[in-house]
Image (cartoon, helix red, strand yellow):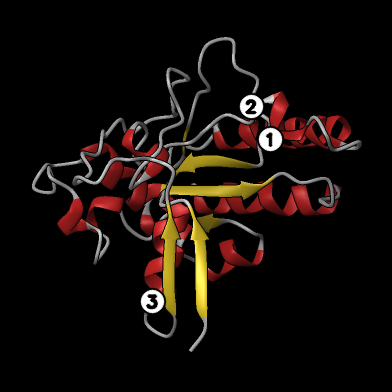
Amino acid sequence: MATIVIIGSGLAGSLVASRLAARHQVIVIEQSRRNEPLRVVDRGRAAALDPHVAAGLGGTTQYWHNGLIELEESDYAAWPLAAAEVDVRRRNAARLLAALQQQAAFETISPLPRARPGYLRLPTLASPEIRGTTAAARLGVFPSYPRALCDLPGFTARCVNRRGAFPGARLLAARLSTLPTHSRLDDRDLARLEGWIRSAGR
């Protein structure tokens, strides 16, 4: 049995630790001195920037439960090709957004005022029937979260407000999907995505 050390008990660290603990000895190192149950703040929308970082069990999810964080310039400043990649992602996202906005079956997510998202992927809200199809997966369209954080086994007991409704988080878990935007997409790939959007939106 291996001993695995995970730095940070935020969303990713908590989930990885939970999965690995079934077969390995897991140690989680957390900088926060907090050692009380987590109270999750359910915003159910893109994360505001005041603040969007937190330490302790659950990490940033204390402020943006199942939200989306804008890509900031400091996140990719050290990557020489980053500016060109982000420009391509923004162009691809704009093209796909135009297609999504023509279909009532999809609900697009507006960025915060004055924000310029880098679009690691393009988020949209769709019905479970649309987002879970094989056709969608073949095009790189994937559901984002299998369930809300408050509904994850092994985590729920640590959440002091676990009996809360969490409508925003559960809505995102049920309907949030993301589309690819990366620079390896060519015109044919984008046309296929637009065709899927039109077909699924009927």
Alpha carbons under labels 3 and 2: distance apart: 36 Å
Q: Residue at x 19, y 57 (%)?
A: 156
Mark 2 Cα-neighbour bin, 10 Å: few <14, some 14–19, many ≥20: many
Q: Nearer the viewer, mark 1 or mark 3?
A: 3
Give the quadrant of residue 72.
Answer: top right
In this view, the residue farthest toward the bottom is 1
* Identity, as a three-letter code, of the amino acid under mark 3: Ala
Under circle 1, the secondary element is helix
Q: Is residue 158 left or right of residue 116?
A: left
**Number of the label disc, if any, that sits on residue 21:** 3
Residues at marks 2 and 1, CA–CA distance in whole angstroms: 10 Å
Position of residue 7 in the picture relative to residue 115 (left or right): left
User: Which of the two labelled residues, at mark 3 and mark 2, occupies the earlier sequence position?
Assistant: 3
Where does residue 81 sit, x and y in percent of width and height?
A: 90, 37
* Place of residue 7 in the rendered image (x, y in percent of width and height, measured from the top left): 51, 55
Looking at the image, residue 16 lies above or below residue 58:
below
Q: Is residue 24 visible?
A: yes
Residue located 48% across and 89% down the image = 1
Q: Residues within 10 Å of mark 3 (few under 14, many from 20)?
A: few
- Is disc 3 placed on a helix, strand or loop? loop
First in residue order: circle 2 vs circle 1: 1
Query: 129 or 67, which lies in front?
Result: 67
**Residue 77 higher or lower than 13, as above or below:** above
- Disc 2: which residue: 117
Residue of label 1: 93
